[in-house]
Image (cartoon, rainbow, N blue to C red):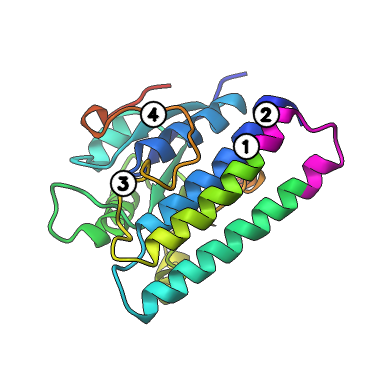
Amino acid sequence: MNKRRALLALRSIDVSYRSAIHHAPASGPRQQGWLGYARQRAEQLLNALEAQLLKEDVDAEVALQLRVVRDSIRRADAGAWGSDAHAPHRSEGSAGWPAAGDSQDWGLLGS
Amino acid sequence: MESHRIVVVNDSPEFLETVREILADAGYEVTAHHGDDLTADAIAALRPDLVIVDLVLRRRSLRDQLAAGWDLLVLIRAHAQLTSVPIIVCSADTRQLRQREGELQQVAATYVLPKPFSIDQLEAVVRSALEDRQAEAS
């Protein structure tokens, strides 16, 4: 796996995980089940990716980003269990991926 | 070889950009949309080979925001030019997916991608949906 793909693979887990918790119910048992499932699944995916990367010669930036994403998942989860499960995606939980544009710019992003 | 056109609908710009990059790297032509004011006609005008839509869309223009993704799915499937276009439903709401399993099975050419997902899972479901469509057409 080349470096770009490894970074995209990490980003896929990180961003889809935060998208999952962004859509979680605001409170209650349903929120707990939702967040628990999302976190468990994210960690499984991350562990599988880490195992795959460790078989190869892992780039230092990829190794660093792997740790950042793992921390990001923990932090995003901790935040979601608090009062605001619907915080903006690129808030404190973000692993620091390049900004994709402000909400005002939403629309057709093109190809 | 002609590139497949994919429309991705999600309320997160970061999600849209990530999926766009992954699928563009895989050779697809991707159009990303946040879902607000998006109509089935607008999607049809893009002549997609595949649509990826989140079951939950926080649309600013609708009161019933949480149902917006499902509504969009139904509108897409009902559109004359989109009836055979495969749809990948993306969601973390396992309960709603279970509740709507029967309905989803009734909607032809619909695939499910639970969130969170890996890059391999995303690519695999896209490949599978497009291959199934080609097999149907031939």
Q: Are marks 3 and 1 in contact (CB under 8 Å)?
A: no
Q: Quadrant of the C terminus of chain A?
A: top left
Nearest the viewer among A88 and A74 is A74
Q: Chain of mark 1?
A: A
User: Measured from the top left, where is residue A91 in percent x and y?
Assistant: 36, 44
Name above or below for residue A78 compared with residue B78. below
Q: Chain of mark 2?
A: A
Looking at the image, residue A3 sits to the left or right of residue B83; the answer is right
Considering every residue shown, the one lying at the far top of the view is B1
C-alpha distance separating marks 3 and 1: 21 Å
Indicate the amino acid at tag 1: Gln
Disc on res. A65? 1
Q: Closer to the observer: label 1 or label 4?
A: 1
C-alpha distance separating marks 2 and 1: 6 Å
Describe the element under mark 3 as helix, strand or loop. Answer: loop
User: Measured from the top left, where is residue A15 in percent x and y?
Assistant: 48, 44
User: Measured from the top left, where is residue A80 in percent x and y?
Assistant: 38, 61
Disc on res. B107? none
C-alpha distance separating marks 2 and 4: 20 Å
- Span shown in magenta: A51-65
Name the residue carrying label 3.
Answer: A88
Q: Which mark sits nearer the N-terminus, 3 or 1?
A: 1
Mark 2: few, some, or many residues within 10 Å (few <14, many ≥20)? few
Q: Chain of mark 3?
A: A
Indicate the amino acid at tag 4: Ala
Indicate the amino acid at tag 3: Pro
Q: Are marks 2 and 4 in contact (CB under 8 Å)?
A: no
